[in-house]
Image: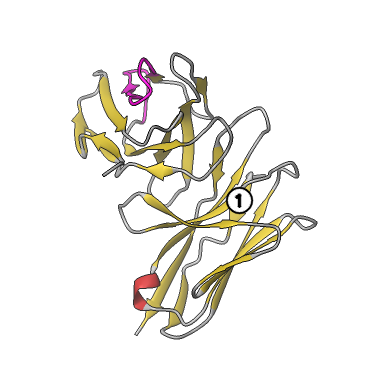
Amino acid sequence: RKEVEQDPGPFNVPEGATVAFNCTYSNSASQSFFWYRQDCRKEPKLLMSVYSSGNEDGRFTAQLNRASQYISLLIRDSKLSDSATYLCVADGDTGRRALTFGSGTRLQVQP
Amino acid sequence: DGGITQSPKYLFRKEGQNVTLSCEQNLNHDAMYWYRQDPGQGLRLIYYSQIVNDFQKGDIAEGYSVSREKKESFPLTVTSAQKNPTAFYLCASSFGTGVTGYTFGSGTRLTVV
């Protein structure tokens, strides 16, 4: 089982739509969670951290469910510029201080 | 401006050659990391370093080597023992020895010719 699993998509949505991505993680001891955005052939960029209480940044909302070990990202009012791959990230083994990345979910927003 | 710089952006290697990818940061970050990304796949950890003169293997360290002689620098050597080195290589850095969000360099795209 992969440490961080995501639906690869693609999710094809019209402009203005609301879209949600889910991700599951296998290590119940994970403490730090993030969503990164990666454009084609570019480096990943931090979109937002994910906290137990949930957090919101403009059109983006991230939620963490520790009991079920999943993380979600909600994008409201999708823009063409939101088209990218979204990477779910968690810290892994406690003995290894490095982040584990999911394979990403591709989003294509259409006009 | 502070940041993390990878060079070169594109690199071509003949089979049997060793090549070294450069990664330099001026963010005063303690930790540095190397990941590999293959087309349509996620990032896989090669090596990481929390402090100078110390580094640990990640999930796919075979065929790679690193050094951390300075806080700012974490070069990655892809040796001839790496049988399938064609990939996108990403260097990242972060504050502290804990797990925090990373800042990535713009990557090096390595192709074996």
For this view, does A6 lie left or right of residue B49?
A: right
Q: Percent from the top left, x then y, of residue A30?
A: 69, 43
- Provide the residue designation for mark 1: A33
Q: Residue at x 36, y 36 (%)?
A: B27
Q: Is residue A111 left or right of residue A87?
A: left
Residue placed at 47% from the left, 82% from the top? A77
Direction right: furthest residue: A67
Crowd around label 1: few <14 · some 14–19 · many ≥20 (10 Å)? many
Q: Name the kind of residue labelled 1 in the image.
A: Phe
Q: Position of residue B103 (x, y in %)?
A: 41, 44
Q: Is residue B70 shown in magenta?
A: yes
- Identify the image quadrant of the N terminus of chain B: top left
- A49 is higher (above) or lower (below) than B6: below
Chain where mark 1 sits: A
Residue B110 appears in the picture as rendered: no
What colouring does the structure picture have?
Answer: secondary structure
Q: Secondary structure at mark 1?
A: strand
Residue B50 horizontal/vertical position (percent): 50, 25
* Residue positioned 46% across, 29% down in the render: B30
State which quadrant residue A107 falls in: bottom left
Principal SS element in the magenta part?
loop
Q: Quadrant of the C terminus of chain B?
A: top left
Against A57, residue A52 (above or below) is: above
Residue closest to the eye, A28 or B59: A28
**Residues rendered magenta in the picture:** B66-84
- The quarter holding residue B75 reads top left
Let me know if residue A88 is in the magenta part. no
Picture residue at 54% right of the left edge, 50% below the top: A102
